[in-house]
Amino acid sequence: MRKLSRPLYGQQNKTAYLFLLPWLIGFFCLTLGPMIASLYLSMTKFNLLSSPTWTGLSNYVQIFTEDDTFQRSLWLTFYYVFLSVPLRLAFALLIAMALNKGIRGLGIYRTVYYIPSLLGGSVAIAIVWRQIFDGSGLVNQFLGWFGITGPSWIAHPDYVVYTIITLSVWQFGSAMVIFLAGLKQIPADLYEASGVDGAGKIRQFFGITLPMLSPVIFFNLIMSMINSFQAFTPAYVIGDGRGGPLDATMFYTLYLYLKGFSFFDMGYASALAWIMLVIIGVFTGIVFLTSKFWVFYGDNQEGR
């Protein structure tokens, strides 16, 4: 193949950079720039009204040694992530397998099940969810038909987090669509051959479906985990924007928001944001490191 002349090669580079220019502007001005500014502010005392005052690592020291709310919000977020993510992925896989049976009107079902993922993060849905789990909401009305008097789920500190977890599980649509696409890529011959060898449905699920679907599970796990660590809107709406009752909905992101925009301690909030970034990076790294033991690629199902 004939090599391009240097002037033509340089012209093509300029054209490429011209097309990349909008993305580069957005990256440097809206992503990298604010991140650098946030890192600087995390080492200052800044109340949004006066100039930042450099304090070094004092914000981080205070967070880890004096801030009890930080510890409670962090553990509550961990609890939410470790419970909601597996439940959502399991429910999404269950529905995907049910829809993978060649039923009629698959596109309609797929759309209906995907709608909660589009609406679930909105303020309106969080308000509706709050009404459903209120003391006189639909859940208690349903329990009343069986003579059961339910509590006010959103007003009880022992139950309110589970209403938010239920809302998270209800938003299974995006993971379900990805699972469904992965299931359709599994060759039917594998199931037929295993059936001839006497393998039942359960053995086929653990011996064929899960290994062949492991790259999709890996992707959904990473995305769901990152999104769950950043959960904010349901906790804000259901907890009246203050983490109530008794800090039972004081998620990490809500605490960060309150510190920055209610107490005007933006330096402290920036430090909290960077701690969360590190936490998400650590957990994502752990999933990547362990993926070589359970994620398989290729028809031979050999580990990476």
Image (cartoon, grey):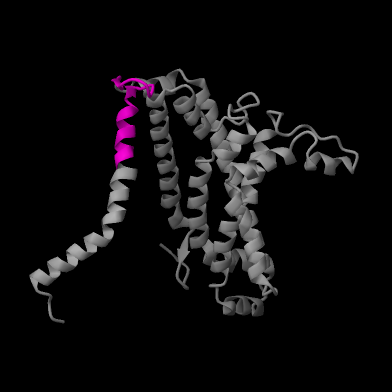
Q: Position of residue 136 (x, y in %)?
A: 80, 35
Quarter of the image with the N terminus is bottom left
**Seen in the image, is 199 located left or right of residue 30?**
right
At horizontal 69% and vertical 42% (from top left) the residue drawn is 128
Q: How many discs mark residues in the rendered view?
A: 0
- Residue furthest to the left: 6
- Residue furthest to the top: 66
Quarter of the image with the C terminus is bottom left
Q: Is residue 30 visible?
A: yes
Q: Image quarter for residue 291?
A: bottom left
The image shows residue 197, relative to residue 129, as above or below, that is: below
At horizontal 39% and vertical 38% (from top left) the residue drawn is 278
Examine the structure image and report whether residue 263 is included in the region drawn in magenta.
Answer: no
| Near-viewer residue (194 or 44) | 44
The image shows residue 221, relative to residue 42, as above or below, that is: below
The image shows residue 57, relative to residue 103, as above or below, that is: above
| Near-viewer residue (175 or 213) | 175
Q: Position of residue 224 (x, y in %)?
A: 52, 50
Magenta residues, start to end:
33-55
At horizontal 49% and vertical 51% (from top left) the residue drawn is 223
| Near-viewer residue (260 or 216) | 260
Q: Is residue 100 visible?
A: no
At horizontal 31% and vertical 48% (from top left) the residue drawn is 27
Examine the structure image and report whether residue 48 is included in the region drawn in magenta.
Answer: yes
**Seen in the image, is 261 located left or right of residue 145?**
left
- Residue furthest to the front: 49
- Residue furthest to the bottom: 1
Q: Position of residue 169 (x, y in %)?
A: 63, 49
| Near-viewer residue (302 or 266) | 266
Q: Position of residue 26 (x, y in %)?
A: 32, 49
